[in-house]
Each structure stands twice: as structure tokens, then as C-alpha cells.
Image (tube, grey):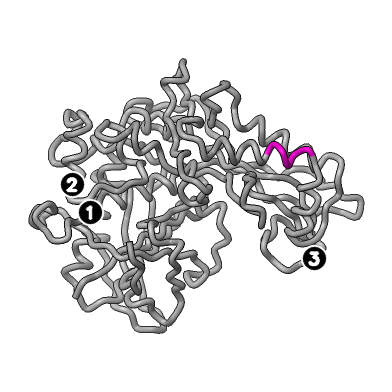
Amino acid sequence: MKISIINIIVIIIFIINLQISTIQCDKYSRQVITNNEQIKRGESNMIFAVTCVSNDTIYCGKIIQSFNTAGIILSSVILFREPLMINVTIEQNCIFGEINCTEEDANLIGIARPGSMVLLVDQSGVERFATRTDYWFQGDPSPTNSLPPKMDFLHLVLREIIHTLGFYSSWETWFTDKTVIVPRPLCDDGIGDCNIRGRYTQKKWIGFREFIFDKYLMNLKTGEMLTDKASDLNKLFDSKDIRGRIKKLEDEFVKSPQYDIAKEMYGLSTTDNTIGFLSWNDTNFSDSLVLLTNVTPFYDEINLRYVSDVLYNNTSDFLMRFQYPIGVTLQDEIINGGNFGNYTNGILTGSIGPKLMRVLETLGYATVYKPFVDYIPKIPPPRPPFDDSGSLGNSLSSITLYQICLLLIVVIYELYV
């Protein structure tokens, strides 16, 4: 797959508990298309506002309709407590030189991450990925008859929204040594949580932070929960006062017993069928949702953030596979997976498979199958300032999963004109 200059970038920022009544053009006088009137309360619990930097209003209209459909699908199975206001920005031609299209991102069609774990300043600070591709929209001629065959854009939208809802692991190659993985390093700069890549030299390293998704990951060979590994890694900070840039943390880490744990986790995360998500009602290892762990070397945006491509091909839990089907519509995938019984009134609710549904329920979402949650997972609060003694003081009160301020998607596609 060759890299070309990207023609369109879609940036979707999910804003919860925020009401936006008007959308204005920015300083570049971008064309604004809003679809608030197209969404009827009761059909979808998502409202979209689209800023489109393109003269092709028909193409932009297809994008809007895809998000409308995705909102209806998700709202038909997830009982959101609050409406989601979704801002979509469509940009053309690596606009203003803001986008760095690199070869290593060639296989990334779309990417999303929970925004509560991302420092969001403005749209220019968003990480963006590029690839040459073409998409099929509902109502277009069959994607199998096009040359080259196209991908169903609705599939991509659904998959990346699921990522923003919490299907996202914190384990990455955070250090320069790319043969170890750890959860996201956590630092404090005297004010609160700080930028781990920042230049401030007096920040204090206080731990490795898991995401809520990581709490339920299991070693399928031994039955050990990976959160126990994270706890072992955090013992590094019980005996060491580590301050400075992230290089200082890495220097101390490689000399510690925790380094071998991180090496072990790297090996586990690059070996096929070794890690699964154990949902709230899973009783056997075989019940878990097996994650993608056969990519070597470990790729931060792929390993542990998708399901096994092989195990879930042509199954009802196809949606979160990394390998994107070419020339196949979302409806075709639902039929191939045997979940067509959930295709009701033209709504493709069969795209949310039973194991994926249990994952969402385990993360704390109420669904049509489990409308009452037994608990609400907590999002770690910002850390209070540390004093001269290194004490972090009293913990702030936690916020719930439904009080997250920002969720983020970056979806990449190309517009052919």
C-alpha cells in the first residue's frame, strides 16, 4: 500500500454534557453543513454538526448520512444517559501543512482514542494518520462492482466510535526501548497531571495508569489478569523518587525488576491468541473476546486495540477486527456472521455482536439487553499537587464514565474529484 497526500481528514470530537446550538465558520471561512434537524429525538441520541472544507457537498452529505446511521445503530443498543454532541471537521489536501503523512501510518485507515486520556488543546494538536483509500456509502452502486473495490464507510465510523467509548488499551511502547510495553506513565508537575513528553524537568513520576479497558484483560494461557502486572510495575514508585523528563524514568526503569515484567508483557502482546477481554458474565476463558496480538513488532495503535482477525472473520463479532473488508458492505458482514436476525427496519444493529455487547456492558454502559448496570466504573481523577515531602495529599473525588468531557475520533479517507 503506497502513501499519497491525504485529501480528506475527518476529526470528530465527542462532547458529553455540552449543548451547542450554533456552528460558526472559523478564520479560514470554511463551509459549514449541519444536520441537527435531520436527527429526531428518539431515533438517535447523537447530534452531529459538520464543518466541511470541500466543494463536493454531495460527498459531504453522504458522510453526514453515515454518521446519522451510526448514531441510530448505537442508540438502538446502548442506553446513553446523555445525548452525545459530535463535531465533525472535514479537511482537504493536507490543509495548511498541518498533516504529517508518514509511511509508518500506511495501514491505519482510521484511529480513535478516549479523549479523557488525551491532552486536547485545539484541532491542530490532534494526531492524524493518512492512507490512500476509497469508501462506499449506502445508496452507492455495489462496492464489489467498483474498481478498485471500496470499503463501507459506515463500518469504519462504527468501529472508531466504539474505540472512543472505551475499547482502548493503555499498554504501549512509551519508552525509547521498543521491546517493552507499560501502561501510560503518570507524572505530576506540582499542579496536577502533566504532559509526559513535556520539557519541564522537575515533574515527579508517580505511576503507570491503566485505562478502564485494561482492568478486564486476561492472560489466556495462565488466567492471570493483566491489571496484576500493572500493579507489579507500579511497585517501582514505592521505593524510588523519580523526577525529571521521561528519559529519567526510563533510565531508572531499565535497572529495576519491573523491566523484566515489561519485557514479558511485550512478548505476550505479540503472540497470537494470548490476551482476551473477560466480560462481566464470562465463566470460561473461551467466553472472552480475544484481542489482536499477532502483530510484530508491537504497534501501539493496533496491538490490544482490535480483536483477532482470524477468530472473528465471518462471525457476529466482526466489527472490531483490524483487517478491513474490501468490496463488502456492513450488511453483508452481518449476514455472513449469522447475526442478520438483528437487522430490523433497515437498522444495522446486528453489527454489534454479543461479545462486543458484553464488553460495553462491562465498561459500565447500560444496553437493551442489560438496562440496569450493577456498578459505574470510575475514571481516575486529576492528581493533586505534591509537596516538598513528595506526598500527593488526599485524592480528589472521582468522576463517572458518563461525565467524561471529551471523546475523540480521527477518521481518514480520501475524496476523489
Q: Residues within 10 Å of mark 2 (few under 14, many from 20)?
A: many
* Residue 357 coordinates in the image, percent (x, y): 36, 31
Give residue 201's mark. Answer: 3
Quarter that holds the C terminus:
bottom left
Q: Quadrant of residue 370?
A: top left
Give yes or no for contact between labels 3 and 2 (Cβ–Cβ under 8 Å).
no
Please tell me whether residue 12 belongs to the stretch shown in magenta: no
Q: Could you tell me the amino acid type at mark 1?
A: Met
* Residue 404 coordinates in the image, percent (x, y): 52, 49
Residue matched to label 2: 329
Quarter that holds the N terminus:
bottom left
* Residue 93 coordinates in the image, percent (x, y): 33, 77
Span highlighted in magenta in the image: 257-261
Q: Could you tell me the amino acid type at mark 2?
A: Thr
Res. 269 visible in picture: yes
Estimate the spatial distance between the alpha carbons at disc 1 and disc 3, rounded to whole Å: 46 Å
Q: Residues within 10 Å of mark 1 (few under 14, many from 20)?
A: many
